[in-house]
Image: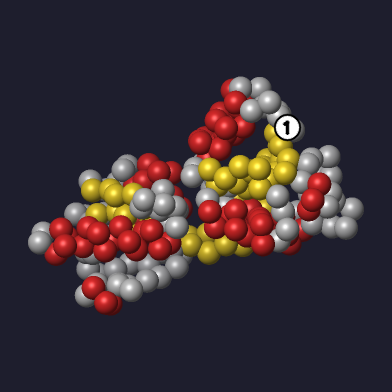
Amino acid sequence: MLKDVGINIETYDAISIEHLNIEIPTAFSHYIFTSKNGVRAYLNNRKEYHPLPDELLCYCVGEKTKSLLEEKGLKVAKMAKNASELSNFIVNKSEKGPFLVFTGNMNRPELGNILRQNGVSFREIKGYETNFNPQAFEREFPCILFYSPSGIKSFLTANKPGNSMAVCIGETTAKEARKHFKKVRIADKATTDAVLDKLIEIYPTLART
């Protein structure tokens, strides 16, 4: 895809995910997932005495999270582009929970803050941990693709932003990027392919700089 338009890329895993053994409380039938990692935390730890998939209503962030939930037979009541959009949807609907939120150790606070401020009953359970894999690069890249705020933080532990442009998968990641990068672009959809499409779109501009 990228080679066809003359774009060479270098890839590495900026973060690694460690899934945890957790005890999922049984008193919830409304689940919130902000990533596929949260879904995997649930799948890895669910027991036969937990509510059956058809007894659950799931709310999630991102198309890939939604696809994984549906692939595993779980009903998705709402998919949003980011945590703020999802929390505002929940606040404005008649169903007020309680909700069980599957999180990691580096989840952003927006969702919890909005739910808490609006009196929505919820409980967070940490199902995974995100670890940095720092790698120093000797060159400055004209463009860097980021898929999460933690990926940005990991990259910056060993590198400087310089004059690179950050292309981000969504607004949440872009919000972190704007703290460090002067030039930030956001994919039109929160998918890996859309990030690559955005790179192809802006590449002629990068090539002239």
Residue at coordinates 62% horizontally, 32% vertically from top-left? 90
The residue lying toward the viewer, choosing from 42 and 92, is 92
Q: Can residue 173 be seen here?
A: no
Q: Give neighbour class at mark 1: few <14, some 14-19, many 20+ (Cα, 10 Å).
A: some
| Camera-nearest residue between 24 and 57 | 57
Q: Where's the C terminus, which quadrant?
A: bottom left
In the rendered image, the residue lying farthest to the bottom is: 3
SS at mark 1 in the image: loop
Front residue of 35 and 95: 95
Question: Is 71 placed left or right of 161 in the picture?
Answer: right
Up/down of 94 relative to 11, above or below: above
Q: Position of residue 163 (x, y in %)?
A: 19, 54
What residue is at 30 percent from the left and 57 percent from the top?
198
Image side of residue 28 versus residue 114, left or right: right
Residue 53 in view here = yes
User: Residue 110 at x, y = what percent?
Assistant: 52, 35
Count of numbered badges drawn on the protein: 1
Q: Is residue 43 left or right of residue 131?
A: right
Q: Locate residue 73, reporting x and y percent.
A: 73, 58
Q: Residue at x 22, y 75 (%)?
A: 6
Residue holding disc 1: 97
Give the camera-side residue of 191 and 162. Answer: 191
What residue occupies the far right of the structure in this picture? 49
Residue in view at x 77 percent, y 46 percent: 56
The image quadrant of residue 93 is top right
